[in-house]
Structures are given as C-alpha cells and as structure tokens.
Image (tube, rainbow, N blue to C red):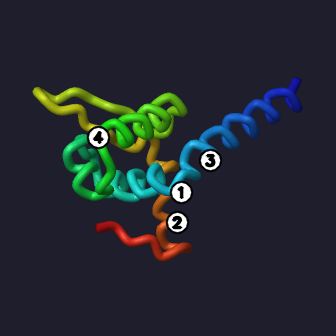
Amino acid sequence: MEKRNENKRYIAASHNLRSISHPLRLAVLCELTKGPRNVTELLSVTGVSQPNLSQHLAKLRMSGVVTNERRNQHVYYSIASPLITEVIKNLRNIYKLSIK
C-alpha cells in the first residue's frame, strides 16, 4: 500500500513539472512569484495573444499550480503553494531567468 501511495506522489509531481515545463508557462510563473497578476498584466509581460495566454493559464490552473480569484472586473492569478513559488525562484536563479 505504501509503495502505491509513493507512486501516486511521483505521478503527481511529474504532472506538475510537465505543466511548468513550457517556456511561456514558466515565464508566467516567474512573474507570479512577485505576487498575484491579472491577465492584462501578464499579457504586457509575455507579449503573447490573450487566447494563447488563457490556454496556458488554464493548463496551470487544471494542474493545480496556480489559482485564480475574481476581483471586480479582473481575474487575478497566483501560484497555488509557497513550495511551488520556491521551486520557480530556484529555477529562476539556476538558469538566470529575468523578469521584465
């Protein structure tokens, strides 16, 4: 039973890592390490189209890496866990990823 639970954790970790492995999603997550951002703010940082960004945000949300919250007219996205934030910050430092 313990081995099965361990395998489930490896699978969950693998899915989360796969969801952040896309360059655009990683750039979004780097920006989100600074705090919650709405779609307009993320569009200005990434320079991609709104439909493209929305697709990637949906993937991050579905994998549990980010959460979203509606505030008035805007939806704000945040990294779901402080541990994920630390992983992204470490990746940023290791690979010298800059945030615009």
Q: Residue drawn 54% across and 48% down? A: 20
Residue 16 appears in which quarter of the rendering? Answer: top right
Residue matched to label 1:
87
Q: CA distance from mark 4 to mark 3?
A: 24 Å
Residues at marks 2 and 4 touching, judged by CB atoms closer than 8 Å: no
Residue matched to label 2:
90
Task: Identify whether 4 is placed above or below 20.
Answer: above
Amino acid under disc 4: Gln
In primary-sequence order, the first of circles 4 and 3 is 3
Residues at marks 2 and 1 touching, judged by CB atoms closer than 8 Å: yes
Residues at marks 1 and 3 touching, judged by CB atoms closer than 8 Å: no
Q: CA distance from mark 2 to mark 4?
A: 28 Å
In primary-sequence order, the first of circles 1 and 3 is 3
Which quarter shows the N terminus?
Answer: top right
Camera-near label (4 vs 3) is: 4
Amino acid under disc 3: Leu
Task: Identify whether 99 is placed above or below 32.
Answer: below
Amino acid under disc 2: Asn
Characterize the local packing of mark 3: few (<14), some (14-19) or many (20 or more) Cα atoms within 10 angstroms: few
Q: Which mark is residue 68?
A: none
Image side of residue 52 versus residue 74, left or right: right
Residue matched to label 3:
17
Residues at marks 4 and 3 touching, judged by CB atoms closer than 8 Å: no
Q: CA distance from mark 1 to mark 3?
A: 10 Å
